[in-house]
Image: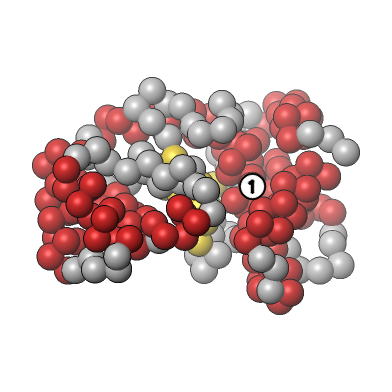
Amino acid sequence: MRTIVSFLSILLVSCACAANAAPARFEAVVPTAQQETDYVWRNLQDIAFFEQNGYNVSFPVGDLIDALKEKARSGSLTDEDYTALGLFMEQHAYRAEDYERGYQHVTAVLSSLEAMVNSIEDEGYGWNFRFYDRYQIFLTLYGPGGSYNPDDGSIILLTNPSGGFRQYANPANTLIHEVVHMGIEESIIQRLNVPHGLKERLVELFVKAN
């Protein structure tokens, strides 16, 4: 069973001849201040889940954020809190240039991601792996590291102003992990009601096996 690293290495070599071709399905996106506000807000609403499952979640730094986290834990967030968060993000936390290095690193691996998805597609599984015509990768400075939306094929990827990523130096590792999550969400996870911990393990094994 190949490791994630060896899987990536093989695919990088196999698609080297097409390195200059624009990927058909993947697009990296720098978020707006409003999009980051909405994402931080969703993470605040899910803070109990994250803490119960041991996630290390990045939030903006500030007294307002500390107060909002406490309100989130008690389930007492209000519309006024959302408005205050939006002002804080726009005036203090958001800078478009903080995403530039991460954006460059992600765009550099898009052709590799295309090759990985093609490799999965060529397997011809006897069960439905869902593919999307378009995968949008929204960068963020916040959240647990990576998340996905199976409704539209979008992925949120944590980076930092230095262009680093959580867990892996190569963002392709996290991105293919999220692609697999979406691919098996309906046909396996939801149909069999797979619990969260086992779901993560299944995705890890699937990526290694391919």
**Against 118, is 196 above or below?**
below
Q: Position of residue 42 (x, y in %)?
A: 35, 60
- SS of the residue at dot 1? helix
**Against 126, is 105 above or below?**
above
Q: Which residue is found at the position 84% from the left and 35% from the top?
A: 2
In the foreground, 197 or 37? 197
The residue singled out by tag 1 in the image is 177
Q: What amino acid type is highlighted by mark number 1?
A: His
Q: Position of residue 129 (x, y in %)?
A: 73, 63
Q: Is residue 142 left or right of residue 198?
A: left
Q: Position of residue 102 (x, y in %)?
A: 42, 31
Determine which quarter of the picture holds residue 6: top right
Quadrant in which the N terminus appears: top right
In the foreground, 102 or 112? 102
Q: Which residue is found at the position 19% from the left and 40% from the top?
A: 62
Q: Is residue 8 left or right of residue 160?
A: right
Q: Position of residue 101 (x, y in %)?
A: 39, 26
Q: Is residue 179 left or right of residue 85?
A: right
**Against 178, is 105 above or below?**
above
Residue 35 visible within the image = no
Q: Is residue 1 left or right of residue 190?
A: right
